[in-house]
Structure formats: C-alpha cells, structure tokens
Image (cartoon, rainbow, N blue to C red):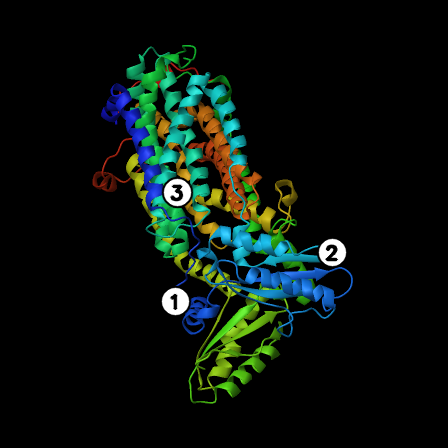
Amino acid sequence: MRRLAAFSHDHRRLVATAWIVLIAAAGALASGVGSGYVNNFTLPGTESQRALDLLRDRFPQQAGDTSQIVFHVQSGSLNDAATKAKVNAVVKSVSGLPSVAGAVSPYANAGTISKDGKTAYASLLFDQQAVDLDKADVERVVDTAKKGAGDGLQVELGGQAIQMAEQPETGAGELIGIGVAIVVLILVLGSAVAMVMPLLAAFAAIAAAMGLVYAATGAFSIADFAPTLAVMIALGVGIDYALLVINRFRGERAEGADVREATLTAMDTAGRSVLFAGTTVVIALLGMLLLGVSFLNGPAIASAAAVALTMISSLTFLPALLGFWGKRVKVPTAVADDAEPRGWGRWSALIARRPAAFAVGSLVVLLLVASPITGMRLGSGDAGNNSPSSTTRQAYDLLSKGFGPGFNGPLLVVAEVKTGGDGKAQLAKLRSALARTPGVAAVSQPNVNEKGDAATLTVIPTSKPQDSATKDLLSTLRDRVVPGVTKEAPALAAVSIGGATASTVDFGDVLSSKLPLFIGVVIGLSLLLLAVVFRSLLIPAKAAVLNLLSIGAALGVITFIFQDGHLASWIGVETTAPIEPFLPVMLFAIIFGLSMDYEVFLVTRMHEEWERTKDSGFAVRHGLALTGKVVMAAAIIMISVFGSFVLGDDRTIKLFGVGLASAVLFDAFVIRLVLVPALMHLFGRASWWMPAWLDSRLPRLSIEGPAEDAVDERDRVKVPA
C-alpha cells in the first residue's frame, strides 16, 4: 500500500491524467455501445413466466404491453352521441402512432363501460413489452390522447408502459445531501481545500463508473433505477473513505511529518482500512448474483462497479490530490501523540464504567425499531401509489371506482388446448370453476387463438392487487381450482396463471428460496475476512449479529413508514403499499457492506491499541475515543446523502433512501458508538482470542500498516475520568 501511495503522490500529474482519460474513455464507450437502461424482468421456472412464454408463442399479437385509455364524465353519460364521438376520435388519434399495435374503442366490446355510464376504457395495445418501448413513443401517445379531453370529458391513461414513461428524473435532491456533506467536511477537516478533495475523488469515480455501467447496457440488461442506486452508494462511501484518509493525514501532519510522509502513512494505515472495507461492500453486492434473478444482476454489478472505482479512487487519485494540495490542508493544533478529544474521551470512559447498561439499552432500542418487520408484507407498488396528480393514478382511481378494486390487478389464465378434442366445453368448465371461486368478481369469456390450440381468460379479483386476499386467491386458483378442472379435462394440456400480480408473488417466492444461500455466502466470507484481520472469533461473530440488527432496524423503519403509513406524509408518500420484494435482499447486501465499513474503521484502531498494550479495556476505550468523531462525521455525511434521495418522486428510490439512511443512523450512532464498545468491554480479553490451531492455519493480513515499537499508551495518554 505504501508503494502505491508513493507512486500516486510522486507521479500525481500522471495519475490525475489517467483518471481524466478513464472518465473520457468511459463516456465515449457509453455513447458508442450503450443501448439504454431496461427493466428486463424474467423468472425462469415460475408459473407466471410459463404463462407469458405461452402467450408470446400462441398470441404474438397480445404479447405487447396492454394499457388503457380511461374516459370519465361527471355529468351526462358516455353513451351520449356527442361524447361517444369525442371518445372515438381519441381512440382513432392514437391508433396510428409509432409503437401502437392497435386501440379498441370502449363501444366495441361489452363490459368496458361502467354500469352508471360515467367511466369507460379503451384497450391500448403496444407492439412490445413495456420495458422494450421507446419512452418518447409512449409520451407521444399520452400527449395525443389527453388533447381530446375537455368540455366535461376527462381522459387519463394507465398501464405499465404509461407508468414507466412517467418515471421522474432524479438529481435535484442529491444537491441537498452534497451541501450537508460539504458543511460536515469543513467542520471536521477545517478547511475548504480539505473538503474539496473527498468530493473530487468521489465524483471522479462516479463519472467513470456511470460511463462504464451505461456502456454495459449494450451487453446485458440493467434496470433503470440501477444508476441512481449506484450513485447513492458510491457518493456516500466515496466521501467517507476520503474523510478517513484525510483525517489520518492531518493527524500525521500535526505530529510533524511532511506532506509526502503524512500521505504515505495515512494510506498505509487508513488506506488499508479503505481497501478492506470497500472489498467487503463489493463482495456483499456481488453476492446478489447468487440469487439467479436477472432483474437484480444489473443493479448489483452497477453498484459494485461504482464502489470498486470509488475505492480505487481513494487509493490512487486521493494521494495525488494530497500531493497537489496537501500543504494547504489545515493542520490541527499539535497535541500529545494520540491524545483523546475531551468529549469523546469522556463518552468512552462512561461506556467503560457501565457497559452492561449501555449494551442492554442499545439492544432494546434496536429491537423496538425493528419490531414492525414482523408485519412486513412483500408486494409491488402500483399506480395506486403514484402521485395523485399523475395520469396513471387518476386512471387507477377511476377504474377502481367504476369497475371494482380488483380491476387494476387482473390474473391472466393461459391454457394450452389440444386440437381435435372437446376444448370449448372444457374451457367453459374452467371458466365456470374460476367464476365460482370466492374472491373472484368476474371472469372473461375464453379468447381462443386462430389455431385453436391456446386460450386466455382474464380473472378480476374482488380485492386490490396489493391486498393479501388477492395473493390468497392466486394460491387457491393455482393449488385447488385449476388442478381440480384439468385432471378431468384432457383437452387442457397445461394451464398457467400469470399477469403482473402473479409475477410479483412468484418473484417474492423465488427470492425467499434463494435467500438462505445468499445470506450464508455473504456472512461467511465477511466472517472469514474479519477473522483473518483481527485474529478473533468473537469480533466476526459479533459483527455478523450486529449487522443483522442494523438491517432489521432499517426494514422496521421502512415497514413503519411505507407499509403502515406512519410519518409517510412527511416524505411525500401519499398512499401505503407492501414492500417491494427485491428491497430486503438489496438492502441486506448494501447495508451489510456499509456496516462492515464502520466495524473496520472502529475496531482497526482498537486492535492497533490491543497489539501495543495487550490491555483490552484500554484498547476499546482509547480506540473509541480516537475514532468516534470520524465515525460520527462519516455517518452524518452518509445519512445526508442517502436522505436526500427521499426528496424525489420515485417510490423505489424513496424506499432505498429511507432504508439506507436509517440503517446508517442506527448502525453508527447506536451500534458502533455504543453497543460495540459496551460488548467488547463485557467480553474483555476474550474479544481478541482465537485458538492457536486456527491462528496458525489462517493467513495473516494486516490493515494497520507496519508494526511499530510497542508503547504502553497509558504512560502518555491521559484518559478523562
């Protein structure tokens, strides 16, 4: 590490130029081969995927996205001649637009006008699935249709394609987070020059990462929220990593080292912690690839790439910046070596005197915050969670009011029919069985394809798509109703139930089945790394358990807000909904990695003191006193950055912002600055114990730099009582 730091410092112009070239090359590559972000959602082996595959094969004209143009009048009726002419004009105006396969007037089919004649919908069929459509084409459809509104006629549009085209651009909220980070950096580092360097290092890494990630879209699918998530994580960890290094640099300068020596020492100590912490974050993020869900691969790779480049920037570009501007970094007032800040010294001593009380109090707080997780329901948000002013939300509400709450979440039954048999009669029997099932509001007539070898039926539940009753209905239909019909209907070769609601349920089931492997691998690798570094069994075990507690606290907070609705209006959440199925998995990967950051930053200094003094109590107390300020500052920066993403309109990004901000809040301020030192005081020397046979077999990896002469720090450090 020292050699890398020396090269970066001594050849700083070359290193800076290399980063500029990397950013430019990534941008050029992105513009040359990048094809754009798409939400390619497939679930191989699930019933909903089998239904979609059969639909694409036997009903190619229906394989595109189906949306709705919703019409509503407050007075009069949609059956009035003048209103009917306006409705048909709207349908005709969108029929010939690019990406539109067809539009069917509500007057062409039965059941598309509500009983009171106030609400109706036209079926709008696109020629591709929503994820493959050009956003500009969909926006043109929306604009064209809404031009037909007026004179008492309301026109709104709903459907997945419309909702994806409505997704807001992000970016404004992050500026607030960066502003808070700037203030904290100036307060901690003492000068504008020192504040600029962490931001430059982070922004350089993010610019290169985003270019490379966009270029990768030419090779495989990456979800549209992946870049925002990657920026969110990289910005937080990038500033934190640079803060850790520069803080150590200032300490070395205060002890009399010149800029070069202070840079090399900082990189050989704090830089090693950055390398280790960044590696654990990357491992945790890439662990999501084990889930085998293509939808999550893109966000995992994008975030891991952003963190990896952020780590590399902190280890190469940051030393180069210190070479340029290190002399202008404000040096703190010289004090005795490793002198403890008065406030943190007192706090650390207070925990040392009453570790049991602090440990129990912290655990109670964490368990209380995590308690809402026991009622967490998994499910995808839909248009009913959109802004009340959006056209998709307006369409959703009008359809629910006019046709029932289950209309917005239909179940699509796709049947493979053997030709030459009594297919029509058996399809009628299937429809009758579906219609008799409690919880079913209506079932459409079978729609048979031209060859007669496949048919579809649409089932409208009586409950909303996000209700648990809808999930129960799906299970009943799949497990009892459909098998009960098909075992006596030989003409129905295969019957699968799909649709958006069914896909969400299957998605949750797939993730649940793969979750144990994912968690086991991530925790196992992290435990091994910590055991190798700190030569301890208790520290890795403690870290794993406490990391799970911080994840539980984050999930408890998002359940409390987004599902249960408490304080939701404070962050612009208008309606409650279940938690997205992929969110717990992704939060686990991200939070586990970030929690390891703080664990490494804190315990590394404690371990350094233990190696010097072999006094466990002093090592824990002194290590906390020396690192508490940096951990707190780093946490405030991360909370500010993550929290700023809550200011946008996208629900998924809000979920990540609240989840990550709350995780860092409880992980840093409750776990690392209270619970960890309290537990380590209770464990005593056992914190640093490892069986001799295991110690001799594990490789040695130091993140504390070269060994120094052992000095009993108690002889020269006065710890406040």
Question: What separation in Å lies between label 1 and label 2 (alpha carbons)?
Answer: 50 Å
Q: Residue at x 42, y 86 (%)?
A: 419
Q: Is residue 319 left or right of residue 644?
A: left
Say above or below: 562 vs 507.
Answer: above
Query: Label 3's element?
Result: helix
Question: What separation in Å lies between label 3 and label 1 (alpha carbons)?
Answer: 27 Å
Q: 633 or 687: nearer the eye?
A: 633
Q: Residue at x 50, y 82 (%)?
A: 484
- Residue, disc 3: 303
> Image quarter for residue 270?
top left
Say above or below: 143 vs 267.
Answer: below
Three-letter code for the amino acid on which mark 2 is drawn = Asp
Q: 364 or 410: nearer the eye?
A: 410
Q: Quick one: label 2, few (<14), some, or many (20+) residues within 10 Å?
A: few
- Residue, disc 2: 151
> Image quarter for residue 210?
top left
Query: Label 2's element?
Result: loop
Q: 77 or 50: nearer the eye?
A: 77
Which of the image's four quarters has the N terminus? top left
Q: Which mark is residue 144?
A: none
Three-letter code for the amino acid on which mark 3 is drawn = Ser
Q: Which mark is residue 45?
A: 1
